[in-house]
Image: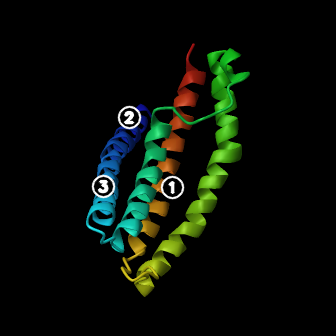
Amino acid sequence: MRKFIQYVDRINDFIGRMASWLILLMMFFVVYEVFTRRFLGKPTVWTFESITMTYGAHFMFASVFTLVHGKIASVDLLYNKLPRKKKALLDIFSYSLFFFPFIAGVLYFSVPYALDSWKIGERSWSVFAPPLYYSKTVIPVVFFLLLLQGCAEIMKRILILKEE
């Protein structure tokens, strides 16, 4: 169980760190667009969609990284006052009741959504017309990683409950 936890934590931490570099790519697109629009008077068609897709991937992958490091926003009014084992029980309960059903639902609907996009070679409606299937594939990939991380988080709580 500990090896699975370490493996999932390491993979998701690495993916999150790599995805954090997408913000630099997005920043390049923004600076390029501002420069071409303001100083050259020649705005581009492709930068807006590039910025949107880059930010979408960045935001999605950052959610996995955030879960690995326990930085998800939560209401801690009573939670912080609970002893460690009661926190673990509450976490197992809330993951089971809210997290896993949500993840399962998104996975259930996003896999066919992404596959259909690949089948038809879906492209954006704009003049730039970039492929959309890459962006749509990010959704099931990220939610699968969230599912793995959720399992690792549950296992961490089980280990806490087993402590003497």
* Residue at the disc numbered 2: 6
Give the image location of residue 50, x and y in percent. 36, 66
Q: CA distance from mark 1 to mark 2?
A: 19 Å
- Mark nearest the camera among 3 and 2 is 3
Dot 2: what SS? Answer: helix
Q: Which of the marked residues, 1 or 3, is nearer the chain's N terminus?
A: 3
Residue 25: quarter of image = bottom left
Q: Residue at x 41, y 79 (%)?
A: 118
Q: Nearer the viewer, mark 1 or mark 3?
A: 3
- Disc 1 and disc 3: Cα gap in Å? 31 Å
> Could you say which disc has been placed on residue 143 in the image?
1
The quadrant the C terminus occupies is top right
Identify the secondary structure beneath mark 1: helix
Near mark 1 (Cα within 10 A), the count class, few <14, some 14-19 or many ≥20, is many
Q: Please name the amino acid that badge 2 sits on.
A: Gln
| Sequence-first tag of 1 and 2 | 2
Question: What's the amino acid at mark 3?
Answer: Val
Horizontal side of residue 59 vs 90, given as left or right: left
Q: Quadrant of the N terminus?
A: top left
In the image, residue 147 sits, relative to residue 108, either above or below, namely above
Please give the name of the residue rendered at 33% of the width and 42% of the height, measured from the top-left corner: 17
Q: Which residue is mark 3?
A: 31
Q: Residue at x 46, y 32 (%)?
A: 69
Given residues 115 and 72, the one toward you in this image is 72
Q: Amino acid at mark 1?
A: Phe
In the rendered image, the residue lying farthest to the top is: 164
Color style of the picture? rainbow
